[in-house]
Image: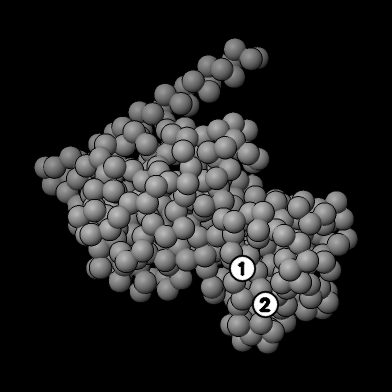
Amino acid sequence: MKTIRKVRTLTILVLLGFALTMLFYGEGQAKTQLQMPLGGVRGSYYMIGAPTAKYVNEHSDKIMVTPNTSGGGVENIRRVSQGVAHLGMATAMEMHKAWNGMAPFKKPMKKWMTIGVSTKVLLNHCATLAKYKIRNVEDTKGRIFAIGAPGSAAAAMMLEFLEFTGLAKDITMRKLPHKDYPTMLMDGKIEVFNRLGAVPSGSVEQIATQTKLALIEFDGLLKKTDFIEKHPYYQKITVPGGTYKGEARDTTFFGAAGYFIVRADLPDDIVYEFTRLAYSEASIKSVTMAFKGNGLTRATPLKGNIGPVHPGAAKFWKEIGLTIPEPGLK
């Protein structure tokens, strides 16, 4: 049986390798096909990555980017580092853990580099139904809490927080597909869900239009512990009351910004082409029209970045007058 599994695994890897090196032929010119795993179709990564890919594909005679769904940042960084994808998105938290081989990664993963920021600080939106009377994160004790999808940054971040604060032992945690959260919450199969994303969150809005929801406050426990100080890749952000229908309170969450990552061995000219187009003013405008929660910027594209910048991306940033900071990860 082990031999059969090894053969199957090798076959899959060979096929994936072949698929990723195929060229897309169109109008007499060859375009290098790039696979870009993102996240769920309603998530911030996909909402940013899909229109970015569309713009790049329409304006490049060199590359063709195909956005794919995935579990999220943890899966993305694994796939890029293992060479079964070319581009992706991940947060500074995932970069830190992947580089150092910390859970949820089983070993160091360093065969990736960064391009630039893609999202604003993504918040761990924790929502529930108002009828459950869960107001603060401490109130999730004894509850069924969907902390994020398998392989997602949401699950990794929330698990880190719950374990650090000691709440994990008192909560029934589930890792479930993000797309099912609104329905599962409404049906009573879960009592709390965590959706990582920009403000506003589509999943939270979906609930708010159907019933009375409540957001879960983190500020009290964040102040009582040194969670942010011990995990400097996170930031606290307060969502003003009224952002979501039915929730009048200001609510504080924590999160991290997201970045485009790329295979370290991808040719410089390919990465340069993607960077040049993805961060053009016209591209940023087109993405913003599709999703206002994006963080694409030419002014400070490496702010908060801790990973090594790919030479192809660095070439473009230098051309527009930016300085490449020393990476935090070495």
Sort mark 2 into few (<14), some (14-19) or many (20+) by Cα contacts within 10 Å. many
Q: Is residue 94 above or below residue 133?
A: above
Residue 236 marker: 1
Residue that badge 2 annotates: 251
Amino acid at pointer 1: Lys
The residue at the point 55 percent across, 33 percent down is 108
**Lower sequence index among marks 2 and 1:** 1
Decide if residue 258 is on the left or right side of residue 147: left
In the rendered structure, are the residues bearing label 2 and label 1 in contact, judged by CB atoms less than 8 Å apart? no
The residues bearing labels 2 and 1 have C-alpha atoms spaced at a distance of: 10 Å
Sort mark 1 into few (<14), some (14-19) or many (20+) by Cα contacts within 10 Å. some
SS at badge 1: strand
Q: Is residue 19 above or below residue 282?
A: above
The residue at the point 13 percent across, 42 percent down is 29
Image coordinates for residue 231, horizontal then vertical, percent: 63, 54
Q: Is residue 109 visible?
A: yes
